[in-house]
């Protein structure tokens, strides 16, 4: 491996592992999110120029922090802010170990800042994904089904609003937390969902692990918040099934075809306990319902069939609270399985208003599945091909190829 490639690999690894912590530390102490992003971007650029020549430092994260702080100080001098208290926070020597590296509280504090009431509610989770977790605008756009250019403009407006409004970079008071926590939970869930949407993207699994960790942390800090418990349970159910998501050939395995013996029993037990605790509040919400759906899917681990009727009812409750595109697609599948009538599920899918864009990969995959189950082989093949063109995940490509081969073997 060349020195240039080693330096690029080290910089990419540092970005995946440390971007959120570094940005949170800089933004919270300097109280300027845009300036912190610029300083950190310059530090990464400097790394790509310096590391190939001098070698990758023993602690890339500490090197980047030192470089970013230096960039912030240059801005301070230019703006004649030498007396600002934030300047003293940036004067630590390179040998000092930055306090926040092992503490997730910095990221959560910045996420709560991004949930400030002055910021548009629909932009708060997206801003957290980019500013705290380092997700590119194009990937965020895929989660929220908008054009990348539109998402980039919205994020730019949100950051400008933070600066122009002088939003304080302090942890909100206790009375403010309930109003902001829902946006934090949504951002964590969106970060985890990116693992599936962009499975082939470098660092996707790292982002999922980060989201699962943050969900656990938020639940521990808010033990009486049923939705925080619900999200933690939901991600535990998903993580418990991770070992069974791929077959021996590395192809994606749908949930109802996974081998329950490969699921993580300890994680499932923890998820069951969390969901039971959340139910005690008698205040059902989106993440509790999604966790309950996943719990129902796990019924097979006890030897019983998948309770599609219960799952259908849970999806109907979920749609009443949070009618997302993903929930609508899954509801159509649940209807087909519960009724034993694929045509009914297909009719529900075709009646979606608004219909997902033609670039929505999951819509084509679900449509292909229902068309095949309804006996429309030719149309199913076309839909499988459409779904195939919209993914770069090797695991999903392998699964879709197997579906097409199955149809071909039947003479269609």
Image (cartoon, rainbow, N blue to C red):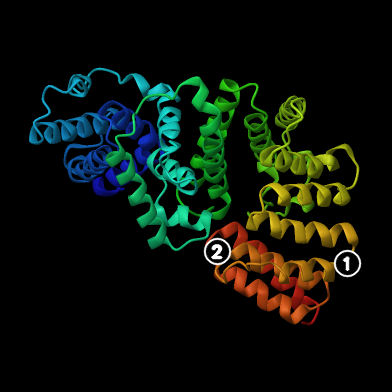
Circle on res. 391 = 2
Instruction: Identify whether 12 is placed above or below 266.
Output: below
When asked about the image quadrant of residue 269, the answer is top right
Of badges 1 and 2, nearer the viewer stands 1
Distance CA(mark 1)–CA(mark 2): 28 Å
Residue pictured at 50% horizontal, 20% vertical? 174
| Viewer-proximal residue among 298 and 161 | 161
| Viewer-proximal residue among 160 and 373 | 160
1 or 2: tag closer to the N-terminus: 1
The location of residue 287, given as percent across then percent down, is 67, 39
Residue pictured at 25% horizontal, 42% vertical? 44
The location of residue 134, given as percent across then percent down, is 39, 43
Quarter holding the C terminus is bottom right
**Residue 251 appears in the picture as rendered:** no
Residue pictured at 72% horizontal, 56% vertical? 330
When asked about the image quadrant of residue 130, the answer is top left
The location of residue 175, given as percent across then percent down, is 52, 23
Q: Is residue 173 left or right of residue 373?
A: left
The location of residue 390, given as percent across then percent down, is 55, 67
Q: Is residue 145 left or right of residue 27?
A: right
Instruction: Identify whether 238 is placed above or below 269.
Output: below
Residue at label 1?
341
């Amino acid at each position: 491996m060349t020195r240039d490639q080693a330096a690029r690999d080290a910089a990419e690894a540092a970005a995946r592992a440390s971007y959120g912590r570094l940005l949170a530390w800089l933004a919270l102490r300097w109280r300027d999110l845009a300036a912190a992003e610029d300083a950190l971007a310059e530090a990464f650029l400097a790394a790509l120029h310096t590391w190939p020549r001098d070698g990758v430092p023993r602690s890339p994260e500490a090197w980047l922090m030192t470089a970013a702080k230096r960039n912030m100080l240059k801005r301070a001098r230019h703006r004649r802010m030498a007396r600002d208290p934030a300047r003293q926070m940036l004067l630590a020597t390179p040998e000092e170990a930055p306090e926040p590296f092992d503490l997730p509280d910095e990221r959560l504090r910045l996420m709560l800042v991004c949930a400030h009431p002055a910021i548009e509610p629909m932009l708060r989770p997206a801003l957290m994904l980019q500013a705290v977790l380092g997700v590119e605008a194009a990937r965020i756009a895929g989660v929220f089904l908008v054009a990348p250019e539109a998402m980039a403009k919205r994020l730019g407006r949100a950051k400008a609003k933070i600066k122009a409004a002088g939003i304080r970079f302090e942890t909100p008071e206790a009375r403010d937390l309930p109003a902001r926590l829902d946006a934090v939970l949504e951002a964590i869930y969106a970060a985890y969902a990116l693992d599936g949407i962009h499975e082939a993207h470098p660092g996707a699994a790292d982002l999922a692990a980060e989201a699962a960790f943050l969900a656990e942390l938020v639940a521990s800090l808010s033990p009486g918040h049923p939705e925080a418990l619900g999200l933690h349970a939901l991600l535990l159910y998903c993580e418990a099934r991770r070992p069974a998501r791929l077959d021996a050939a590395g192809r994606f395995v749908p949930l109802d075809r996974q081998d329950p013996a490969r699921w993580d029993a300890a994680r499932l037990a923890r998820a069951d306990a969390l969901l039971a605790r959340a139910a005690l509040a008698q205040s059902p919400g989106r993440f509790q319902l999604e966790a309950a759906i996943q719990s129902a899917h796990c019924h097979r681990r006890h030897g019983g069939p998948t309770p599609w009727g219960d799952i259908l009812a849970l999806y109907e409750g979920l749609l009443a609270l949070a009618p997302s595109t993903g929930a609508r697609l899954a509801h159509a599948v649940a209807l087909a399985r519960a009724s034993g009538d694929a045509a009914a599920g297909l009719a529900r899918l075709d009646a979606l208003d608004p219909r997902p864009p033609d670039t929505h990969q999951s819509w084509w995959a679900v449509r292909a599945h229902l068309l095949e189950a309804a006996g429309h082989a030719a149309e199913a093949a076309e839909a499988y091909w459409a779904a195939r063109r919209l993914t770069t995940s090797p695991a999903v490509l392998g699964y879709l190829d197997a579906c097409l081969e199955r149809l071909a073997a039947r003479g269609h």
